[in-house]
Amino acid sequence: MTELQIKKGPRKRFAKNRKKAWRKHTDIKDVEDFLEDQRMQLRTGGLVSEKKDENLFFVESKPAIEEPEHSKGRRKRVKVEKPLKCHRNLTPNPFIPPVHSPTYTKPKKKGKRVLAKEEAERKGLIGRVKKQKLEMAAVQRQTHKQLKQRQGESRKSGRQEYDLWSGKEVDNVKSPDDGGHYLTITKQKRVKCRRQHLSKTPVPAVEVLPSGASYNPSYEDHQDLLKDALVEAVACEKKEAKVNRWHSFSTVDAYDQQKNWLSEMSEGLFNEEEKQPIAIKESVKEDDTAGKTGTRKTRLQRQKEAKIKEMENKIQKGKDKNIKMHQVYRLKALKNEIKEEEDLMKKKREKKLAVKKQLSKKTKQIGPHKYEAVPISYKLSDELVGSLRELKPEGDMLKECYKDYERRNMVEPRVWKRGTKPNLKTVEKRSHREAIA
């Protein structure tokens, strides 16, 4: 038998009136093969039908190597060493991309520099951008050189000195390394990312005492300090005396006390109408009679009053109209008045801002109690020693530190109240009583 003969059996018969039988007995192998081939193409670089001719074919630009004459007519087999099939199955397919990790990575946003570069490439401005970069680099080198020169000068001259009690503001004196160290190390300027309200310090952290509080002050400064301490002590005594006057009882003689007691005890016993003066009673009676004897107006009288009122309104309207007409000729005067009002409002605004600025540097009331400043610590003239080693300290450092927190609005002012101790109760035990008995 030259040809393979396949013995076919009887044809299968099935009901064709149901879709279930269609799915079971229909041959769809050619469709599955086509889909499998399509999936394979997608895994290995995309569908062949959608690819361009450039991706499918290529033109060989190099000339073909001519075979020598002695080798024409006979070909020599070149043995190519191929890897084993078991190893070839393990090598990855270059057309299949690697599997991504399941973890989601947020795509990075393009920075300002990248976006600017893309925009420049789109518009064809790469040359101009390079030129700008070179100019900026030259400016940075120049500034870096100037900063180095300044640092050298500041190192030679040393630290800047200033008088603490000269009256000048300390903020005006800049340190020799004002932002230069950051620029020299990082080659970049410091970014101003801090918010404006955080940099504001309304109440200074360190309160500079007057020059008279020094351990070796001049005579005039020390006398000024003593004068301020005296004023503070006198004000404190006046306040205490005022509180004592409120709580003190008035001293009354025995005769005045008896007289007051009689007047207080006899209050409401006698008729109050008899005590009223006669003139008040007569005036009350006249008012009552005047209200009762009032006559009613006639219709003619009411009409006459209405006409008079109408005429007055008409005259008033005419006057108002004339005033408005004459105001046209007062434009210059009105402009001057408006300017004066604006100047006045500007002065008031400036004054209000100055007061607000001054109040911002003071302690605010953030609790039920007001902040009370620490009394001025001072030394009398005979207590001054002139040496810091022999000087005795004044005040309490812990209290002053806590008061400093209150002054800077970090802690609300508080008042220490001592609690009353409960009275001790003595209890006699029954067993003790029985033992004594």
Image (spheres, helix red, strand yellow):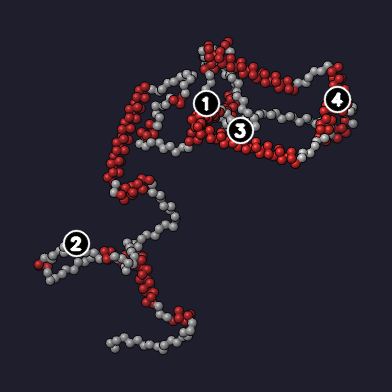
Residue 77 % position (x, y): 18, 68
Label number found at residue 436: none
Secondary-structure class at tag 2: loop
User: Which residue does the numbered mark 3 point to in the structure image?
Assistant: 366
| Residue 93 visible to an observer of this rendering | no
Residue depth check, mark 3 versus mark 4: number of the one nearer the observer: 4
Crowding near the residue tagged with mark 2, few <14, some 14–19, many ≥20 C-alpha atoms within 10 Å? few
Tell me which corner region of the image, top left, top right, bottom left or bottom right, holds residue 187.
Answer: top left
> Who's the residue at 11% across and 65% down the image?
68
Query: In the rendered structure, which disc, 2 or 1, sits on the residue that comes first in sequence?
Result: 2
Residue depth check, mark 3 versus mark 1: number of the one nearer the observer: 3
User: Which residue does the numbered mark 1 point to in the structure image?
Assistant: 206
| Residue 103 visible to an observer of this rendering | yes
The answer to whether 17 is drawn above or below residue 144 in the figure is below
Label number found at residue 278: 4
Query: In the rendered structure, which disc, 3 or 4, sits on the residue that comes first in sequence?
Result: 4
Secondary-structure class at tag 4: helix
Tell me which corner region of the image, top left, top right, bottom left or bottom right, holds residue 434.
Answer: top right
Point out the image quarter for the N terminus.
Answer: bottom left
What whole-number distance in Å separates the C-alpha atoms at marks 2 and 4?
140 Å
Query: In the rendered structure, which disc, 3 or 1, sits on the residue that comes first in sequence?
Result: 1
Task: Say which amino acid is labelled 4.
Answer: Ile
Task: Say which amino acid is labelled 1.
Answer: Val
Query: In the rendered structure, which disc, 2 or 4, sits on the residue that comes first in sequence?
Result: 2
What whole-number distance in Å separates the C-alpha atoms at marks 2 and 3?
88 Å
Label number found at residue 61: 2
